[in-house]
Amino acid sequence: MLLMVVLLATSPTTSRNQMTKSYLTPIDDNYATCERTKAVLRIYCGDASPSSITSLLSIQPTSIVELGVPQVRRGGKHGPIGKINLWMLDSEGAIQSKDLRRHLDWILDILAPVSAQILSLRQSGICMDLNCVWWSQSGEGGPALWPDQMRRIAALDLELSIGFSYYGDDD
């Protein structure tokens, strides 16, 4: 009987909605243990300019760092001179959810139409990763990922890192 249940749960005709109901952590945009979270796709361009990545992917980055070029800070002030060429797509500001899965899905949905280009960049030796930060509300908890996000990240051959932060009470 157990074998039948497993076969039914993995059947191609099983709807995605039915499968997600079997996970322990449903999507929760108000994720109680999270203060805020974000995900950033970082593409280290090497000798190539970040604009060449923009052209290849036809995706506007949320920010770039250019080798030898002063970074522009808020208010138009100049920051440090770029030591690398870096192209970034950051979910912060685009996604309001405290559920990291929403942030990852946002980036992965943008990358889906250009997955061949992402894999081509990876095969040419360009380093890239998904870097996430999860700020704890109370010093406990942590994000959950579903197999769906893990499969999509693996299909793009992306490394995933998650940094945890907790700053405590202001008192």
Image (cartoon, grey):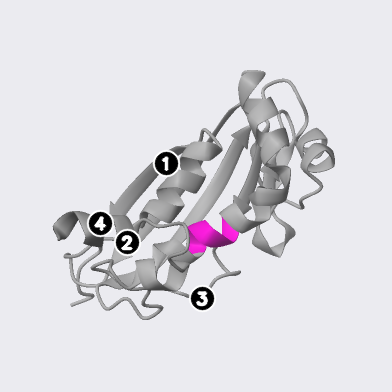
Q: Earlier in the sequence, mark 3 or mark 2?
A: 2
Mark 3 crowdedness (10 Å alpha carbons): few <14, some 14-19, many ≥20: some
Q: Is residue 31 shown left or right of residue 92?
A: left
Distance between mark 3 and mark 2 Cα atoms: 32 Å
Q: Residue 6, labelled with which disc?
A: 4
Distance between mark 4 and mark 3 Cα atoms: 35 Å
Can residue 84 be seen in the rendering of this structure?
Answer: no
Q: Which residue is mark 2?
A: 9
- For this orientation, the residue located farthest to the right is 55
Q: Is residue 118 shown left or right of residue 140?
A: right
Q: Depth check: 131 or 56 in front?
A: 56
Distance between mark 1 and mark 3 Cα atoms: 21 Å
Distance between mark 2 and mark 4 Cα atoms: 5 Å
* Element carrying mark 2: helix
Can residue 65 be seen in the rendering of this structure?
Answer: yes
Q: Which residue is mark 3?
A: 96
Residues under numbered marks 2 and 4 in contact, where contact means CB atoms less than 8 Å apart? yes
Start-end of magenta stretch: 103-107
Where is residue 71 drawn, in percent x and y?
Answer: 69, 44
Q: Earlier in the sequence, mark 4 or mark 1?
A: 4
Q: Which residue is mark 1?
A: 160
Mark 2 crowdedness (10 Å alpha carbons): few <14, some 14-19, many ≥20: some
Q: Earlier in the sequence, mark 4 or mark 3?
A: 4
Reply yes or no: does residue 104 show up in magenta: yes
Q: Depth check: 58 or 135 in front?
A: 58
* Element carrying mark 3: loop
Where is residue 28 drawn, in percent x and y?
Answer: 36, 77
Where is residue 47 drawn, in percent x and y?
Answer: 73, 20
Amino acid identity at mark 3: Gln
